[in-house]
Amino acid sequence: MRHETDESLTRICLAVFRLNGALLDAGDELARPLLLTSARWQVLGALALSDTPLTAPRIAQAIGLTRQGVQKQLNALAPLGYLEKLENDDNRRSPLFWLSDAGRRAYQEMDALYRSWAAKLVLGLPVEELADAARTLEELAGRVKSWGASNTPQRGGRES
């Protein structure tokens, strides 16, 4: 038997899946004039918001993508001149990445496009409700991350 909280969580999960797809599509559209995609924008953002150069695994950890996915985006961003690749004294096989001046400008342009789009998107939505939604999603994300799949019922509906 399903409970109301089960139904609410299911609605949240489905809404997040739909929102994620819609945000990626919108991000791709916003980023296209700068020769970016949502994924490349995320990588630029991780570097822009960091105080120090980052390795591909650290970028992946910061934005919730795989290391391989981040490396693919780094490889696409490098020919655009958006990155500086630095030696990593701690691990020679894992270079550090930093935004070049061109990368910083591209990120700033992208940020301005995003802020304008976002302001229109949330027009008329109460700030308190947006803040509550963000807190709830952050709490759920933290629980999912810390619990992983270890707290799921066993197949057949029986919990161990």
Image (cartoon, helix red, strand yellow):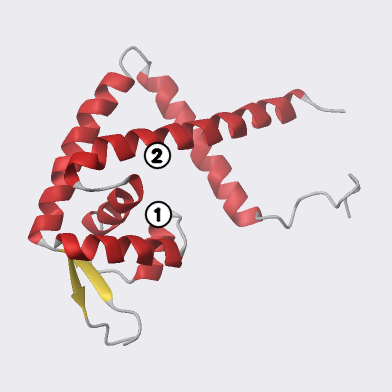
| Residue at horizontal 41 percent and vertical 25 percent from the top | 130
**Residues under labels 2 and 1: Cα distance?**
14 Å
Residue 73 image-quadrant placement: bottom left
Residue 68 image-quadrant placement: bottom left
Does residue 32 appear anywhere in the picture?
Answer: yes
Give the mark nearer the N terminus: 2 vs 1: 2
Mark 2 Cα-neighbour bin, 10 Å: few <14, some 14–19, many ≥20: some
| Residue at horizontal 38 percent and vertical 62 percent from the top | 70
Left or right, 51 with reference to 121: left
Task: Locate residue 80, reporting x and y percent.
Answer: 16, 59
Q: Amino acid at mark 1?
A: Ile
Mark 1 Cα-neighbour bin, 10 Å: few <14, some 14–19, many ≥20: some
Residue bearing mark 2: 24
Q: Amino acid at mark 2?
A: Leu
- In the image, is residue 70 above or below residue 95? above
| Residue at horizontal 60 percent and vertical 56 percent from the top | 146
Mark 1 element type: helix
> Can you tell which of label 2 and label 1 is closer to the viewer?
2
Residue bearing mark 1: 63
Front residue of this view, candidates 134 and 39? 39
Left or right, 56 with reference to 110: right
Left or right, 148 with reference to 23: right
Task: Locate residue 116, reporting x and y percent.
Answer: 20, 27
Q: Quadrant of the N terminus?
A: top right
- In the image, is residue 9 above or below residue 41? above
Q: Quadrant of the C terminus?
A: bottom right
| Residue at horizontal 19 percent and vertical 34 percent from the top | 113
